[in-house]
């Protein structure tokens, strides 16, 4: 990334904004109906002698998000407007683009996610590893707490183009670009004035049409790293069944309100309500379930494991089964009875039950990384890292502390068929551990309800979803 070790030897106490080089070249693509510049300014925020750490949290969905910079010198509350959701820091820097005559032609602010997946250390004496997550999250509207950070002596790449979602464009030519970290963050991160700005020479040249033509700004936030490691394979021998420990760390499964709710028409005048459902672990122990395959069968016996406060295994109990799902789009092992989704009438009586009752556990969402023992860098972050293959003799599925597992119910048999239901008020019920096969610290918080209202006619059904304390997700 261009930051030299020698340059970082005399480390300032605070953070600083650094550029990989003074002269930047970007290509302008002609896609036929619009132009777009693939802009990468090569900028990084480098943490100084102390890590940059921000914790954003809301007490409830009725409360605003507050964010604190965590420091040995004392925590600092970020001003209102700097953190408005759980996706990162808003209006972090100001970018000024001037043409060859010195005229300002673009002036905009950029956001910043400190949790970049390509974060690296900039000096050899810096800590060898970073504890911070590989992205900022925020995709789930009901995230409760996030942690963002840059390890001491490490660097995180910044955003380059305005966060409009539209292609970024500049005519072919030469420009000067000035980038300055805004005052609220200079104070919060102890960035000296001389370390808060960079000036670059930008040349935009004509490029050929390619895959990046409509990409707009350069995307620093790639997919989460997947790693199916040997320790995530189960032992060959089934554990001796025992009772769950009466005391000690336990998972605590909780359901978030359904989100991403929509209505879609189907074949034969059918109408379906689609939704996303998240169950997360707010406990003091990960939910860890091993599956042991029955000989010659597409079925595994599942066991839940328990650990003491030092992480030593102290027990295991039967927890149902895992089954092989050969359907297209699945083709992995599902743990049965992890959750249940129902559509309830206004009187909370069952109207429709989702056919989805078996799940591959994975840490797909950051729900609350501010709770004690939250796992900021889980390994099994998608289906490929935690669900096994057809010929697997065993599978380990994990839901780590602070993390959630989201399933989008948009497939027939999983989404709710509301074709024959009358208009009116209904509730999407998300219920964790419905059969009580898993041992957890509390079962009183396993269920959530999300209100929806069906309307329209048989040929044109409508759906409205009231927000939850102003959250429209």
Image: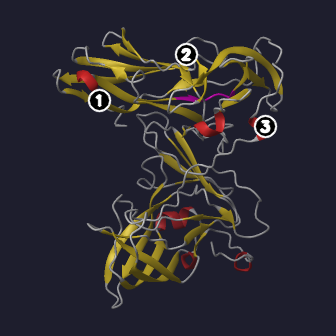
Q: Earlier in the sequence, mark 3 or mark 2?
A: 3
Count the numbered circles shown: 3
Residues at marks 2 and 1, CA–CA distance in whole angstroms? 31 Å
Q: Against 461, is 46 above or below?
A: below
In the image, taking residue 216 as reference, residue 118 lies left or right, namely: right
The residue sitting at 35% across, 19% down in the picture is 427
In the depicted view, which residue is nearer to us: 352 or 47?
Answer: 352
Of the 4 image quadrants, the one containing the N terminus is bottom right
Left or right, 459 with respect to 473, comes to left
Distance between mark 1 and mark 3 Cα atoms: 42 Å
Instruction: Report the mark closest to the observer, 2 or 1.
Output: 1
Among all residues in the image, which is located at the extreme front? 296
Q: CA distance from mark 3 to mark 2?
A: 33 Å
Which mark, by number, is residue 425? none
The residue pinned by badge 3 equals: 231
Q: Residue at x 77, y 18 (%)?
A: 316
**Image spot of residue 184 (x, y percent):** 48, 63
Q: Which residue is mark 1?
A: 263
User: For this rendering, which residue is in front, 60 or 277?
Assistant: 277
Of circles 3 and 2, the one toward us is 3
Dot 2 crowding, Cα within 10 Å, few <14, some 14–19, many 20+:
few
Q: Secondary structure at mark 2?
A: loop
Residue drawn 70% across the image and 55% down it: 130
Q: Are marks 1 and 3 in contact (CB under 8 Å)?
A: no
The span picked out in magenta is: 279-288
Tag 1 or tag 2, which sits nearer the N-term?
1
Q: Quadrant of residue 105?
A: bottom left
Whole-percent x, y for residue 104 in the image: 32, 81
In the image, residue 282 lies in the stretch drawn in magenta? yes
Q: Secondary structure at mark 3?
A: helix
Q: Which residue is mark 2?
A: 444
């Amino acid at each position: 990334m261009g930051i030299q070790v020698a340059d970082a030897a005399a480390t300032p106490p605070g953070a600083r904004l650094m550029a990989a080089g003074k002269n930047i070249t970007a290509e302008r693509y002609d896609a036929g109906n619009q132009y777009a510049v693939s802009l990468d300014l090569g900028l990084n925020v480098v943490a100084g002698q102390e890590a940059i750490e921000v914790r954003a949290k809301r007490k409830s969905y009725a409360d605003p998000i507050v964010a604190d910079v965590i420091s040995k010198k004392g925590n600092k509350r970020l001003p209102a407007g700097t953190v408005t959701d759980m996706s990162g820091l808003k209006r972090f820097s100001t970018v000024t683009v001037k043409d060859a005559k010195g005229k300002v032609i673009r002036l905009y602010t950029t956001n910043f996610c400190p949790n970049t997946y390509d974060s690296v250390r900039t000096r050899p004496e810096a800590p060898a590893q970073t504890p911070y997550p590989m992205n900022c999250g925020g995709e789930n509207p009901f995230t409760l707490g996030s942690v963002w950070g840059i390890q001491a002596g490490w660097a995180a790449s910044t955003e380059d183009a305005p966060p409009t979602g539209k292609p970024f464009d500049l005519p072919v030519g030469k420009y000067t670009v000035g980038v300055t970290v805004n005052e609220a963050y200079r104070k919060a991160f102890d960035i000296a004035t001389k370390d808060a700005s960079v000036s670059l020479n930008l040349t935009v040249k004509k490029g050929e049409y390619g895959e990046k033509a409509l990409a707009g700004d350069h995307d620093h936030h790639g997919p989460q790293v997947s790693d199916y490691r040997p320790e995530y394979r189960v032992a060959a021998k089934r554990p001796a069944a025992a009772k769950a420990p009466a005391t000690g760390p336990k998972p605590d499964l909780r359901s978030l309100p359904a989100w991403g709710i929509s209505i879609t028409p189907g074949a034969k005048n059918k109408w379906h309500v689609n939704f996303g459902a998240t169950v997360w672990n707010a406990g003091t122990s990960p939910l860890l379930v091993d599956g042991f395959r029955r000989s010659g069968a597409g079925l595994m016996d599942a066991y839940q494991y328990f650990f003491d406060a030092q992480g030593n295994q102290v027990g295991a109990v039967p927890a149902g089964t895992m089954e092989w799902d050969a359907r297209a789009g699945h083709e992995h092992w599902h743990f049965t009875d992890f959750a249940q989704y129902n559509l309830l009438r206004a009187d909370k009586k069952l109207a429709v039950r989702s056919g989805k009752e078996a799940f591959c556990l994975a840490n797909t969402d950051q729900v609350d990384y501010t709770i004690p023992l939250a796992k900021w860098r889980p390994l099994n972050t998608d289906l490929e890292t935690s669900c096994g293959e057809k010929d697997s003799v065993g599978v380990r599925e994990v839901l780590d502390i602070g993390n959630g597992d989201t399933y989008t119910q948009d497939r027939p048999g999983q989404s709710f068929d509301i074709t024959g239901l009358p208009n009116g008020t209904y509730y999407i019920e998300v219920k964790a551990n419905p059969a009580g096969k898993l041992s957890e610290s509390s079962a009183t918080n396993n269920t959530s309800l999300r209100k929806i209202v069906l309307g329209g006619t048989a040929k044109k059904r409508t759906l409205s979803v009231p927000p939850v304390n102003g959250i429209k997700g």
